Image (cartoon, helix red, strand yellow):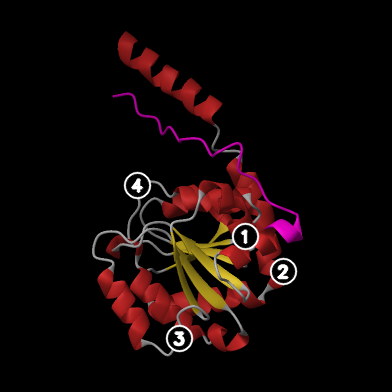
């Protein structure tokens, strides 16, 4: 049987926003007033957000003036996440932000203003937010399971998504180690070269031709 992995392409129009005024206006529009770590996606159990919130609390970063921003629509079984946030010593609207849906026009600026994207999903079909962060020059902390290591390549700081202490250590490291962030940003831009729609189309055509001649 002919087998070949065909990757989808990254959005070629999504790129880093370098204008501080645009970033500041976007961040302010979503009510964010601190340096922040960003999760971007639907709020639902498989995204592992309860452990992420617990890890953020355990990391102590909220005492270092950081916020955790969980941006996206509330999805299936989002209520336990909201309850978990309420049980922790974190101020919603200050140390934790739940801004809801992010307009596509704001995505690049919101990503560009983040210290890092944190994406510890339990499982993913692909993981587009990783590529979106890398396109905007933002380092990534992601789960070392499911499809995410394959998507992030060597440009993501990988964690065991079931271990709150490991996630906490990783997000504290990414927030405090500027050299690591710089290294992952450079590797992230290089990683994006693997995900082009033109190449995906060419590879798909090759698979179809091979299947047709088999």
Crowding at label 2, few (<14), some or many (≥20) Cα neighbours within 10 Å? few
Q: Which residue is mark 4?
A: 125
Foreground pick, 79 / 137: 79
Disc assigned to residue 26: 1
- The residues tagged by marks 2 and 3 sit, at their Cα atoms, a distance apart of 28 Å
Labelled pair 2, 3 in contact (Cβ < 8 Å) = no
Q: Is residue 190 left or right of residue 57?
A: right
Q: Is residue 102 above or below residue 86?
A: above
Q: N-terminal of the two: label 1 or label 4?
A: 1
Q: Nearer the viewer, mark 2 or mark 1?
A: 1
Mark 2 and mark 4 lie on one chain; the one further toward the N terminus is 4
Q: Is residue 114 visible?
A: no
**Region in magenta:** 1-22
Say which residue appears at 32% left-offset and 75% top-offset: 82
Residue 56 lies, with reference to residue 112, above or below; the image says: below
Q: Quadrant of the C terminus?
A: top left
Quadrant where the N terminus is found in the figure? top left
Which comes sooner in the sequence, label 4 or label 3? 3
* Residue 169 visible in rendering: yes
Q: What residue would you read off at disc 2?
A: 179
Whether tag 4 and tag 3 are in contact, CB under 8 A, the answer is no
Residue linked to disc 3: 90
Q: Residue furthest front?
A: 29
Q: Residue at x 68, y 60 (%)?
A: 23
Q: Residues within 10 Å of mark 4 (few under 14, many from 20)?
A: few
Q: Residues within 10 Å of mark 3 (few under 14, many from 20)?
A: some
Q: Earlier in the sequence, mark 2 or mark 3?
A: 3
């Amino acid at each position: 049987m002919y087998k070949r992995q065909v990757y989808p392409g990254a959005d070629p129009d999504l790129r880093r926003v370098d204008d501080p005024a645009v970033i500041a206006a976007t961040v302010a529009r979503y009510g964010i007033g601190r340096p922040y770590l960003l999760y971007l996606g639907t709020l639902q159990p498989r995204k592992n957000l309860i452990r992420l919130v617990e890890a953020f609390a355990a990391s102590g970063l909220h005492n270092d003036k950081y916020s955790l921003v969980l941006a996206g629509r509330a999805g299936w079984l989002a209520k336990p996440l909201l309850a978990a946030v309420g049980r922790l010593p974190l101020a919603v609207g200050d140390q934790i932000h739940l801004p809801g849906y992010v307009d596509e026009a704001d995505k690049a600026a919101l990503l560009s203003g983040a210290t890092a994207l944190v994406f510890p999903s339990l499982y993913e079909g692909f993981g587009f937010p990783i590529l979106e962060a890398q396109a905007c020059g933002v380092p990534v902390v992601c789960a070392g399971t499911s499809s995410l290591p394959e998507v992030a390549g060597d440009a993501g700081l990988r964690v065991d998504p079931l271990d709150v202490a490991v996630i906490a250590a990783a997000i504290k490291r990414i927030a405090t180690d500027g050299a690591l962030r710089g290294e992952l940003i450079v590797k992230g831009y290089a990683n994006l070269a693997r995900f082009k729609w033109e190449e995906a189309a060419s590879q798909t055509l090759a698979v179809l031709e091979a299947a047709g001649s088999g």
